[in-house]
Amino acid sequence: MPIIIASETHEHPESIATQTSRKSNIENQQYSIATKQEINSEIQFERLFGLDSKFQGEETKIYNCHGLTFVSKRTGIYKDEVINLILNDEYKEIKNRN
């Protein structure tokens, strides 16, 4: 699911030069404030799983889960097509040898 970012709720994001090993550019954004969608997701999470369910660690808007996985916590990757580009450039299917 793509993340919708309302321009009136965000400052202008920063980005860093990032490429795959095949030299494909990776579009990315670094934010310093939460999106409305992120805030609403946290509220929904607590409604679904109870107030005792909390996210662990310090919150950051510099990177998201895809930024953690693919670019070492340096930035956020938000578009599905960028994630597919990374997967197509970097990963190979491991087939069963049996």
Image (cartoon, grey):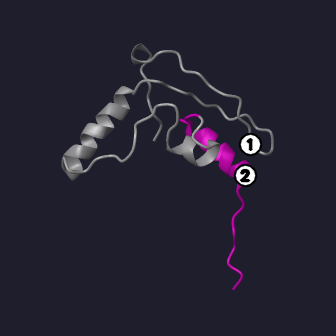
Q: Give x and y (percent) for residue 70.
A: 62, 46
- Which kind of residue does numbered mark 1 sit on? Thr
Tag 2 secondary structure = helix
| Residue 78 located within the stretch drawn in magenta | yes
Q: Earlier in the sequence, mark 1 or mark 2?
A: 1
Residue range in magenta is 75-98
Q: Residues within 10 Å of mark 2 (few under 14, many from 20)?
A: few
Q: Are marks 1 and 2 in contact (CB under 8 Å)?
A: yes
As drawn, 2 above or below 31: below
Real-space Cα separation, disc 1 to disc 2, in angstroms: 7 Å
Identify the residue position indicated by label 2 in the image.
90
As drawn, 53 above or below 79: below
Q: Residue at image x 69%, y 64%?
A: 93
Relative horizontal placement of residue 16, taking residue 52 as reference (left or right) = right
Q: Give x and y (percent) for residue 52.
A: 20, 50
Of residues 73 and 65, the one drawn nearer to the viewer in this rendering: 73
Q: Residue at image x 35%, y 27%?
A: 36
Q: Residue at image x 40%, y 13%?
A: 8
